[in-house]
Image: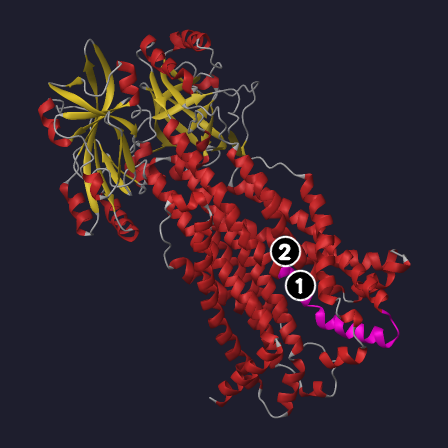
Amino acid sequence: METFRLSLNLLRRDWRAGEWRVLLLALVLAVGSLSTVGLFADRVRQALWQQATSLLGADMRITSTRALPPTYREMAEGRGLRAVESRTFPSMVAYREQVLLAEIQAVETGYPLRGQIEIDDGAGLLTGRGGEREAQSLIPSRGTVWADERLMRRLDLRVGEEVGLGTQRFVVAARIVKDIDQTLGFASFAPRVLMNEADLAATGLLQEGSRIAYRLMVAGEAEQVAALRAQWLPRLSGNERLENVTDARPEIRTALERAEHFLGLAALTAAILAGVAMALTARRYVARHLDGCAVMRCMGAQQGQVLRLFLYQFVLVGFLAVLAGSLLGYVTQAMLIESIASMREAGLPQPGMLPVLKAGVSGFALLIGFAFLPLLQLRRVSPLRVLRREMGLPAVSGWLIYGLAILVLAILFLWQAGSLKLGLTVLGGLLAGLLVFGVLAWLLLQGLARHVYLSGARHALNNLARHGRSAAVQVVALSLGGMALLLLTLVRGDLLQSWQGKLPADTPNRFVVNIQPDQRQAVLDFVEAQKLPPPRLLPMVKGRLLAINERAINGESYADPRAQGLVEREFNLSYADNMPQWNELVSGRWWASSDEVAGQLSVEEGIARTLGIRLGDELTYDVAGSRFSARVTSLRKVQWDSMQVNFFVIGTQRLLQDYPSSYLTSFYLPPDKVRAGDELVRVFPNLLVIDTGAAIAQVRNIIAQVTQTVGAVFLFTLLSGVVVLYAALLSTQDERVQQVAILRTLGADSAYLRRLHMGEFAVLGLLSGLFAAAGAALTGWVLARHVLEIPYQSNSLVWLTGVLGGMVLVMLAGWLNTRRLTEMSPMRILREE
């Protein structure tokens, strides 16, 4: 207790002297930044997830071609989850003399569980949100159905008229304005009709052999849904498929993953900058307490006692800073949400406590990794320092100090980035960049001091070279702060603008499937007559994977349900001479048109990973009773959110051209030509025209929300960047005070001191601005390449702004920090020190 009381007394003294203010500010801002970013990102992620689940109608669902056992629903309700069932099947809808194939979905009370359905009953729009009491009655009443816009347009149908389904007649009570619960698949994009489950039996449509998709949908607390998923997975049979939004919709999954990675890296940037600020502050703190520790050692204090004195202070200040930073983060993100109209109107869900806990743990980790270990140097201060003040800092293993800092950074990277590969890539790049920038800064400072002979700059350059190590650290720290500014102001905007450009206005919103070989030219002529851009027709061959390297496979060969489903169904194969532009070659080599080898395959990397397919493997397929084998010569990365036609497996033309095939294509259908799609189906009744407008709108909505919010998230990295700039300049403040006192004693006037300081700050600003621009460009490339997966376009303004802005900013901050010293007398300076 005596040691603790002494520690508190020292803390009060140092607090009055201003010792702890900078360190406390750095830690509060570190935790505040992390908690703000974490809370804000958590609310955005929840909102994006909820919007994505609106297309699924639930948090999770089981789909099967056979009736689901009642135990599945009992297990869900036993966990307190809400559950509804539906049945979906194709059937003809009759209206007057017309019939049209439609997708019929029979739903029960309580549907939907997530999202919202909008209908127009002729008197206005009605909306029901999933799970709310109003939504439980928002399903068709007995004897009525709801029809979507496509069916009503094709049949020229109006609300209030009757249609025939099976043996029954139903009144079309409403038009579906906004639909949910759809899957992006070739079998589920016919016009939709929603009916009451209680009317289904009377229609006579449920016959032996009917193609019915049975669905059990559940929603509730995320933890219970995850637990139910783990409980369901081992029980799934071969014809049952478990889906959440990421399983069911690859294009939504891709957009969500990129959004989450982008927001995670924004939080990570704040953590890095906060750690650097704390390291610089701790370095100055240790240097200023060497003499005091030496006196305590002379008075009989043991090394362990000295360490405990500072340990108690750090733990107490750390605890208070974590509390203050967490409160600051919560208040700041709430104010931020209220200040952005789009966020306020979006009704973002309240954040959980996990981001606050993560911020608190991260804050203590940063404190230990960047600030506490340098205190070991205070523990080893020799009593001789009382007599020999020229003794430097006590030796402590640099591997221990820097190794722990790197370990803390690695853990935070992997925790915040959400991707092992991405976290390691960015961490490795950061450490390599800091090392390269530090070495370059030291070499440049030494070179400038030796080879620049301008009389006005000579003293400034020699002074920087004499303190080359600390000056290099200062340059690296300043460059990190400048990099944050450039990322916020320039690079972020370019990246988000390029990401938005991935889905331009003419993104294909129609897929046409089942084009027969003899219909190719006729379809192209029809599209040309409608004055639409000519589409590219791609061949599709259906084949079942039988063996990998002559080893027979089936569903039992895999434990993963997704892999089981893939090998138990037919693949859509295609052939092409050139790789699609929206695909990227990951490994291997794409075949040239002059290749004589007939049997070559290119496989999408995701399905290759799922099925255990590697480059060079031989795959055996069965196509219409005929087998062929071919080698995998390349792996591709597919941009699923490009809304283009994509295939898991593409072969050479010589390999597949003789097998039975059909063709498919995608194209953009403008809103004023929407009836051209209906006319295409009327002229070619065998074609299936798939409207992907809802999926495109959802991806665009996710991108738009991230574009609006990520700028606000990066504002907090800006705050951390400013702290780094301040801490970097403050880290050499004591040395400058001593230097000014000596120079003033030797006769230097205020003008000379100002020129000296401005010369040093100009060089520091020039180098840090150059490195900041290089770091921002490199970070932008990493984000574009590995997160948003877009081409990176360099911006020359980043380099110009970085160099000139770095010089101006550092010179201005340095002048504000040192202008008082140039006017003070040597005695007063030494007394204040």
Amino acid type, residue under disc 1 in the picture: Ala
| Residue 776 x/y as whole percent | 63, 47
- Residue 90, compared with residue 311, is above or below; it is above
Pointer 1 residue? 728
In the rendered view, does 255 fall on the left or right side of 763?
Answer: left
> How many discs mark residues in the rendered view?
2
Observer-nearest residue: 108 or 138?
A: 138
Amino acid type, residue under disc 2 in the picture: Gly
In the rendered view, does 25 fall on the left or right side of 804?
Answer: left
Pointer 2 residue? 481
Find residue 510 and report its image quarter.
top left
Find residue 525 and report its image quarter.
top left
Observer-nearest residue: 566 or 790?
A: 790
- Residue 357, compared with residue 770, is above or below; it is below
Residue 395, can we see it? no
Q: Which residues are magenta?
A: 724-749
Q: Dots 2 and 1: beta carbons under 8 Å?
A: yes
Q: CA distance from mark 2 to mark 1?
A: 9 Å
| Residue 209 x/y as whole percent | 16, 23
In the rendered view, does 696 fall on the left or right side of 806?
Answer: left
Q: Residue furthest front?
A: 123
Earlier in the chain: of badge 2 and badge 1, it is 2
Magenta segment main secondary structure: helix
Dot 2: few (<14), some (14–19), or many (≥20) neighbours within 10 Å? Answer: many
Q: Is residue 456 magenta?
A: no
